[in-house]
Amino acid sequence: MKQTLLSLSNLSKQFSGKTVLDGLDLEIYDGEFITLLGPSGCGKTTLLRLMAGFEHPDEGTITLAGEDLTHTAPENRPLNTVFQHYALFPHMSVFDNVAYGLKMEKRPKDEIRQRVDEALAMVQLQDFARRKPHQLSGGQQQRVAIARAVVKRPRLLLLDEPLSALDYKLRRTMQVELKRLQRELGITFVFVTHDQEEALSMSDRVVVLKDGLVQQLGTPREVYERPANLFTARFVGETNFFPGTVETVDDDSITVDVFGLKRTLRRPDFAVSGGQPLNVLLRPEDIRVLDPADEQGVAGKIVERNYKGSTLDSVIHLADGTEVLASEFFDEDDPAFDYRLGEPVKVSWVDGWEWLLPGETGEALPEEDVSADA
Amino acid sequence: MTRWLPRTYLTLVYILLYVPIVVLVVFSFNESRTGYAWGGLSLRWYEALFNNRAMVNAMWNSLWLALSAATISTVIGALTALALHRYRFRGKKLLNGMLFVVMMSPEIVLAISLLALFLLVGLQLGYVSLLLAHVTFCLPFVVITVMARLSGFDESLPEAARDLGASDFTMTRTVLIPVIMPALLAGWLLGFTLSLDDVVVSTFVGGPSYEILPLRIYSMVRVGLKPEVNALGTLLLVFSLVMLMLSQWILIRSKR
């Protein structure tokens, strides 16, 4: 079932002495929606440009269905690109933009007309064929760019942050539409984004990149729930990092001291021994905010509350200054559910919902700037 | 007080700029032979102008020279601008700077050096020498106009064309040139007008075999101001205005 379509092996690329990709390996399966996710400068766009043929790797090979493409010119590769700023030809009508690729293949006129009409109908723009790109809205231009890229029926579609210039609502609509297109066309999509929410909601698999290296490769669920390292945990979604120390190790459970609480947790995949520092990772939605009189939990007080519609997000300061993010769903049975600022509470979680990573001593946690992107 | 002062000042400036031109246009329709007395409305100087064979001949020569010089410098200039824009190579900054040197250096210097060069290689002074000289001084203006357009050019357009299956040559023909066309036209018009009214360089490198309009006028005026010159000046003024408006229109239309 899972057949490799595009295979990247040992790709390295430097730009004026700066390493952008460092011996990267990646297998892209036929028909999947794979997302390259990472902060700006992580190499995701360079990787896409190598696949498209706009750049050539210093080392390594790119093969598509067994055929070596490493040094093939972009016009001879059976894949197409949707550009970040659409790159529509400003002097051509929507029809001519979409027809461009077919004209290059020297297809007969009738076939071109029919296929362009089909492609425009697919993105619901059949009434706009005579318009020029500057007469269209951003979302419509984006759809023309997609129609232009898929009209050639490529094996693989490369999308370079195609939604980053759209506003929030249009983005959500386009995300759904892209997923629908991908299902209908059965084309493999390689999607580049720095938006983790987008990556999680659209992809079959996510590749988290940093400094030209794959940090983690997995389904959105794996990446979110079982991050491979602190970078991924921090970059994908909000995470609370609680420092813990291993106390005892059993066959399949360990006891860990977190803020003086002794919790029995599932034994992680990596080697653990008594006295070893650990990171206990908890997503904000896994945090339980309890009454200050409750027996379990760590004492703290509410310093911020944000009403988000479906959830109530709070920031809690623990006694030692640790900041905890909590995101709770409204409780239908408790209409009075809310907090006052400064209200004392206790913070806990359900055992088994945590994720453990080895404590990386000496290395500071990644700073907030990894999640921001230009 | 504060309101009328700037206005008066501005009015004075404009009077100073435009009175000579208005006088020229008005006196081109003057019946009287002398340039300083009004003798009634007439088109006789326009008639005299078109009956003056040498003058009409010089006009055609000038137009042909401007046309060829503008076209050649647009082709060379566009290619130069593309090279400077697309490629990184040794001496790129030097080449870029040298264009400005040609543009900024006094025309008389260019004129003398070109003359010296032509004499050195034994080139007959005439159409060819004028053409070479005019292409030389038009070139930097074309390059700068095209480079300005290219600097705002979306670099992903050529990539999109290549991605869709166009070879480098097809991409240039179907995407790059159409997109920079307004700059090519503007550069061509600029070159055309520069060539048409050049006196200094042409005086040096022109020859008796190919008389051009500015030099013809210049020699006419030396023996005394004939009202024919007013008529010619008026025609040239209208022509330049049309060209100027045309180039502005092209630029505005393309900027949407």
Image: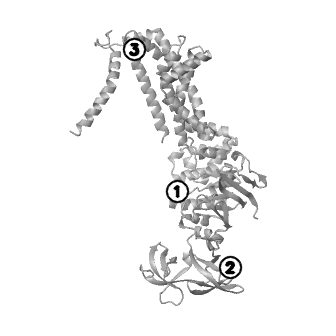
Q: Numbered disc 3: what chain?
A: B
Chain of the residue where label 2 is placed in the rendered structure: A
The residue mark sitting in front, 3 or 1, is 3
Q: Residue furthest right?
A: A66
Tell me which residue sits at (72%, 86%) in the image: A251
User: Would residue A184 be found to the left or right of residue B179 on screen?
Assistant: right
How far across and how far down the image is residue A360, in percent? Answer: 63, 73
Q: Residue at x 54, y 46 (%)?
A: A133
Give percent across and percent down for residue A178.
61, 59
- Give the number of the mark in front: 2 or 1: 2
The kind of residue tagged 1 is: Leu
Residue A237 position by quadrant: bottom right
Q: Are the residues flagged by discs 3 and 2 from a single subunit?
A: no
Pointers 3 and 1 within a single chain: no
Identify which amino acid the numbered label 2 is placed on: Pro
Q: Mark 2, residues whose alpha carbon is within 10 Å: few (<14), some, or many (≥20)? A: some
For disc 1, the chain is A
Q: Secondary structure at mark 2?
A: loop
Same chain for the residues under marks 2 and 1 in the image: yes
Q: In this view of the protein, can residue B128 be seen by the observer?
A: no
In this view, the residue in front, B242 or A26, is: A26
User: Which residue is the site of mark 2?
Assistant: A268
Q: Are marks 2 and 1 in contact (CB under 8 Å)?
A: no
Residue designated by label 3: B229
* A212 versus A338 height, above or below: above
Residue type marked 3: Val
Q: Residue at x 54, y 37 (%)?
A: B147
Q: How is the image coloured?
A: one colour
Secondary element under disc 1, as helix, strand or loop, is loop
Dividing the picture into quarters, in which one does residue A258 lie? bottom right
Q: Tell me the tag on residue A166.
A: 1
Which label's residue is closer to the chain start, 2 or 1?
Answer: 1
